[in-house]
Amino acid sequence: MPITSYTDERVAELLRALPPAPAGWVAAAAELPRTRTELDRIVELATADAEFRRALIEDLETALRSAGFAADRRRVVELRRRLAL
Amino acid sequence: MDVGETTDGELVALCRDGDQQAWSTLVERYSRYVYAIAVQGFRLPEPDAEDVFQDAFARAFERLDALRDDDAFRPWLAQMTRRLCIDVCRRRSDAGEEPELDVEDPSDELGRLDEALAVRDALALLSADCREILDRFFTQDETYRTIGDALQLPPGTIASRISRCLGRLRAELEGRKTMVLES
């Protein structure tokens, strides 16, 4: 990294260079470990319970909500990939 | 352990042991940086930037075991983010959404973001009052009045507090610079 002289203006400019990311994005990324664990559980359930798997294939979002799981876009995309739907 | 004061390497090790709080701290620590690479470095529109943001952290989480040097988490995450951004730019170009494909080397901008991150590291060493007032004024663009109301301070004192805190931040940065030059 280049060594620069830090005037007040330069420091102010650099502080402004990193505005906060949208809070929802940060929260979703921070929740990744829990989300992954939950997705693993859903896949396990789908493997063990033929009826649940059929419901997922028929209407993934509705089946997830009915079973008490969140059905946001990223989760649905990841589950479709994992379940090869 | 206060994970807020731990190094990246220590946080990565805790994450591998399943420590949820350590992961949250890493995300908090680098959320601005990843966001800035996408929206400032590569000028991605928000929906694409969100995909890059989530994918970058998801890949990092999934591939933590592949990280050779735990203390190199930041450049590793930055590299993954850059690759994801380039993929998005190419996809947009192929789809005709980006007529003038702009995957020009944004290394100047990325270098500036690295420097900005160093400033934020120095900011973390200041008092909570200084951190808050500088963050509110410079990154959240709040007015003196809004800051005064939030922190229950007379608006007339805000400018001098900002100036004082900025001086402390500069001192931290100059100290770091001296350490780099001496090493």
Image (cartoon, coloured by chain):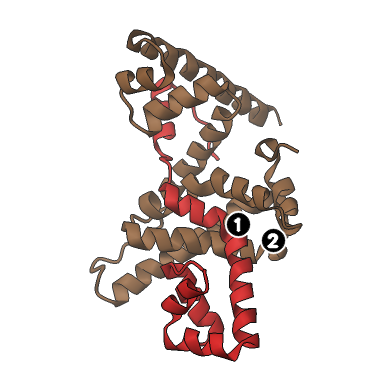
Chain colours: A red, B brown
Residue B3, image quadrant: top right
Say which amino acid is labelled 2.
Leu
A81 or B87, which lies in front?
A: A81
Q: Provide the residue designation for mark 1.
A: B76
Residue at coordinates 43% horizontally, 88% vertically from top-left?
A58
What is the chain letter for disc 2? B
Q: Callout 2: 10 Å neighbours few (<14), some, many (20+)? A: some
Q: Provide the residue designation for mark 2.
A: B67
Callouts 2 and 1 close, C-beta under 8 Å: yes
Say which amino acid is labelled 1.
Trp
Residue at coordinates 40% horizontally, 59% vertically from top-left?
B50
Percent x, y of residue B87 = 42, 69
Left or right of B88 on screen, residue A37: right
Residue at coordinates 40% horizontally, 10% vertically from top-left?
B160
Q: Quadrant of the N terminus of chain A?
A: top right
Left or right of B106 on screen, residue A44: right
Mark earlier in primary sequence (2, 1): 2
Percent x, y of residue A9 = 38, 24
- Secondary structure, mark 1, is helix
User: How many numbered marks appear?
Assistant: 2
